Image (cartoon, rainbow, N blue to C red):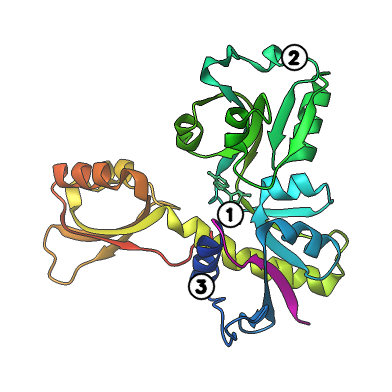
Amino acid sequence: MLLKIALPNKGRLSDEVRELFNDAGLEVRARGERALTASLGGEFEAIFVRAQDIPEFVADGAAHAGVTGWDLVCESGRELDLLMDLEFGRCRLVVAAREEGGFASPEDVKEGMRVASCFPRLTQEFFARRGQRVAVVPVSGAAEIAPHLGIADIVVDLTSTGSTLKMNGLREVATVLESSARLVACKGNPVDTQQKLDELKQALGSVLAARDKRYLMANVPKDSLIRVREVLPGLNGPTVVDVLDGGDFVAVHAVVPAKTIYRTINALKGLGCEGILVTRIERLMA
Ligand code: AMP
């Protein structure tokens, strides 16, 4: 069977999705300039559409799976299986108000206030849950301008660093939803589709698992081995290898967190280690 995966054709998520699929060995092969579909090799095919249309495509069965922002999945109101958090495209859907407007929390939102948002459903739901009746003003972009134009009193908008909100004189007063890029599928897939989806999950997951890890090799004085073990716990403890004519040294290999690599290197140097080598890992299957 051919597993069809809906992917964003442009916009914020498209480059990172492409990079992840490339790294997982599912690069786009044979695609025409404006082609909507492309082979990803083997039994995987990509369908390129707008990020916001992907939940519909997947829910309607035009694609078996899709990658898009969780915010867009929730806003669509379609029931989909969440298969995986892809960890990029992180952002928050927030309630924001003009800095000089005297809003400090969502309690300051008064009955009937106008809220501009590209996410009318999530906005309505958020305030309804709190028992607050607001008038949602649906917009298709640049919601942050609305309070300045007098179209709305507050906005519900996406933010990652908060800089666009700040630039527009808006202050966050509440979080509606935390989002990132997710792999989703339609519910109730038959067994053969499920198997292909598991393959896809494994391919993407092994790349994601490797991204924040490094493979470290070092020559370690034999009498430092016990203390090196504390610095390099590795996945299952470090691998220790004999070095031909290595004298008092053995080679140690371990998978370590990328974030603290400099600290690890310094600690190893402090223990008399030499020939320290660090490389990226393409995939990690624990
Ligand atoms: P697009 O409109 O196609 O550029 O895609 C927008 C999607 O990117 C959103 O639905 C979010 O899932 C994601 N995203 C990540 N960070 C941000 C951000 N700071 N602002 C807007 N969207 C973001």
Q: Which residue is denoted by mark 3 in the rendering?
A: 22
How far, Cα to Cα, is label 1 from label 2?
A: 37 Å
Residue 2 belongs to the span the image colors magenta? yes
Q: CA distance from mark 3 to mark 2?
A: 49 Å
Residue 216: horizontal and vertical position, in percent? 30, 58
Question: Within 10 angstroms of label 3, few (less than 14), some, or many (20 or more) residues?
Answer: some
Which residue of the protein is positioned furthest toward the front in this rendering? 149
Disc assigned to residue 110: 2
Horizontally, residue 271 falls left or right of residue 17, namely: left
Mark number, residue 102: none
Q: Is residue 222 left or right of residue 253?
A: left
The residue type indicated by label 3 comes to Asn
Q: What kind of element bears circle 1?
A: loop
Q: Whole-percent x and y of residue 171?
A: 53, 24
Region rendered in magenta: 1-12
Lower sequence index among marks 3 and 2:
3
Dot 1 or dot 2: first in sequence order is 1
| Numbered label attached to residue 86 | 1
Question: Disc 1 residue type?
Answer: Leu
Residue 123: x %, y % from top left: 75, 33
